[in-house]
Image (spheres, helix red, strand yellow):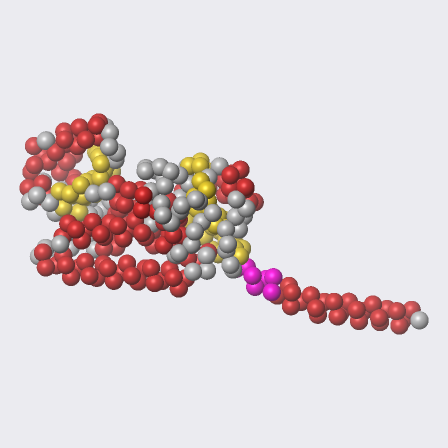
Amino acid sequence: MQVNQVRKWAFLLIAFLLILAPVNQVMASEKKTIIHAMGSSEVPQKVLRVVTLFQGATDSVVALGVTPVGVVDSWAQQPTYVYLRDALKGVAHVGLETQPNLEAIVALKPDLIIGTKSRHEKIYRQLSQIAPTVMAEDVYDFKTTLDLTAEALNKQEKGKQVWDGFQQRITNFHNVIKKREANWPLTAAILNIRADHLRLYLNQSFPGVVLKEIGFKFPLPNENGWGVKLKTKEALPSVNADVFFVILHSNDAAVRQNYDAWRAHPLWKMLTAPKNKQVYEVDNVAWLLSGGILGADKILDQLYQIYQ
């Protein structure tokens, strides 16, 4: 009698496990592992509610055709850059890129958070307790941001389409500029004018990464990092280049006065770009603050305007 009872329970247990096994397999298949700058995270196969914590991630999510449920404030044109306002109409804001509001993020009940190690390493554990969190290494590598975002959102095909479209525009731009500039590729100095100094951005800055992708070269080819600060006008020869792209950091009168002072200096007038009238003021949001593939596309838009 006891043997029969044991057999009965064993049969029921096996039947239960056979029923449960496919359920477990389905549950396991609903998530995937994403490798990122802080390690790895289990992310839902179908993300419905994503929060982005830096500008490049917000830009990339929009480029992939997804509307986030939460974003951080923009650096300028607050709270949202003009070029993203239509896409982000009604989307909640969760504080600053450098100091996101964790309570606001919790309230949005996200199933994915996208941040960056350079900004959010210290709060990664807290973010991960709210929702699966993936992090880019930095804020300037827009291709890596696009790839990570596309993988996390399961939008790899769309990401490839977006990138291929950008590459095609670069090819078209090369056809345009080679007709006008016999010595292509040109050396470009990306100059960011602040109220009290000038910055030369190089290949580990967002505009530097974009221009490098397009094919430009840079002054100080042996210099690594985002760039250098120039505090004295005697350092001007170090920024010499075929073309200057000038980014005024803000509309403050002090910034414009500082720019006027730099370009009035005799050394400025001796440099290649000023001598050849190849100095162009460009949009600070697209060139410096956007951080994503849509911003890079806007940089290309301005280059087309300049060289056509």
* Residue 191, x across and y down, in percent: 20, 39
Residue 249: quadrant of the picture: top left
The total of numbered circles placed on residues is 0
Decide if residue 71 is in sight here: yes
Q: Which residues are magenta?
A: 26-32
**Left or right: 264 with respect to 64?**
left
Residue depicted at x 34% and y 63%: 161
Residue depicted at x 23% and y 42%: 283
* Residue 97, x across and y down, in percent: 41, 39
**Left or right: 15 with respect to 307?**
right
Residue 158: quadrant of the picture: bottom left
Taking 169 as reference, is 135 above or below it? above
Residue depicted at x 32% and y 59%: 163
Q: Quadrant of the N terminus?
A: bottom right
Between residues 75 and 240, which one lies in front from this camera angle? 75
Residue 228: quadrant of the picture: top left
Residue 27 drawn in magenta: yes
Taking 195 as reference, is 53 above or below it? below
Residue depicted at x 12% and y 34%: 263
Residue sticking out furthest to the right = 1
Between residues 82 and 116, which one lies in front from this camera angle? 82
* Residue 126, x across and y down, in percent: 54, 41
Q: Quadrant of the C terminus?
A: bottom left
Decide if residue 225 is in sight here: no
* Residue 21, x across and y down, in percent: 67, 67
